[in-house]
């Protein structure tokens, strides 16, 4: 029982650290949006919003509100959305 508790605490700390790293990425990138044109600013803000949501999912996991399978599912969904955003941007650059 104690081993499970230690493992859970370690995973919770690791999840909180992951959330903190994502927050730091967003915090460093957010001020740069002001220099972008409106369309690029909107796209970048959407991308950063996905990272904010993923950080929140890590916090949910750390608090025990979701399990590791749900965190994996949400993480994969986020990565798929980010990949689609990149593909859409690349496709526009090629056709423009």
Image: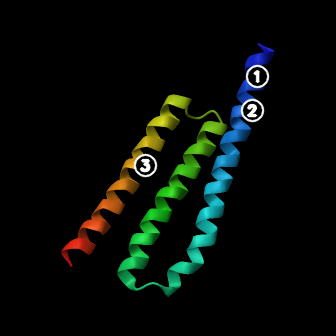
Q: Nearer the viewer, mark 3 or mark 1?
A: 3
Label placed on residue 10: 2
Q: Residue at x 36, y 62 (%)?
A: 86
Q: Give the image location of residue 55, x and y in percent.
A: 58, 51
State which quarter of the image contains the N terminus.
top right
Q: Give the image location of residue 68, x and y in percent.
A: 55, 30
Give the residue pinned by disc 1. 5
- In the picture as drawn, the residue positioned furthest to the left comes out as 95
Q: Is residue 86 left or right of residue 24?
A: left
Is residue 53 visible to us here?
yes
Label placed on residue 79: 3
State the SS at label 1. Answer: helix
For disc 3, the neighbor class at 10 Å (few under 14, some 14 to 19, many from 20) is some
Q: Residue at x 60, y 44 (%)?
A: 58
Q: Give the image location of residue 3, x and y in percent.
A: 78, 17
Is residue 67 visible to us here?
no
């Amino acid at each position: 029982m104690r081993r499970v508790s230690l493992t859970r605490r370690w995973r919770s700390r690791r999840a909180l650290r992951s959330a903190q790293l994502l927050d730091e990425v967003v915090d460093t990138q957010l001020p740069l949006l002001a220099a972008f044109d409106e369309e690029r600013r909107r796209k970048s803000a959407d991308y950063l919003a996905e990272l904010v949501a993923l950080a929140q999912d890590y916090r949910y996991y750390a608090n025990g509100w979701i399990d590791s399978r749900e965190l994996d599912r949400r993480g994969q969904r986020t990565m798929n959305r980010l990949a689609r955003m990149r593909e859409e941007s690349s496709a526009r650059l090629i056709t423009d």
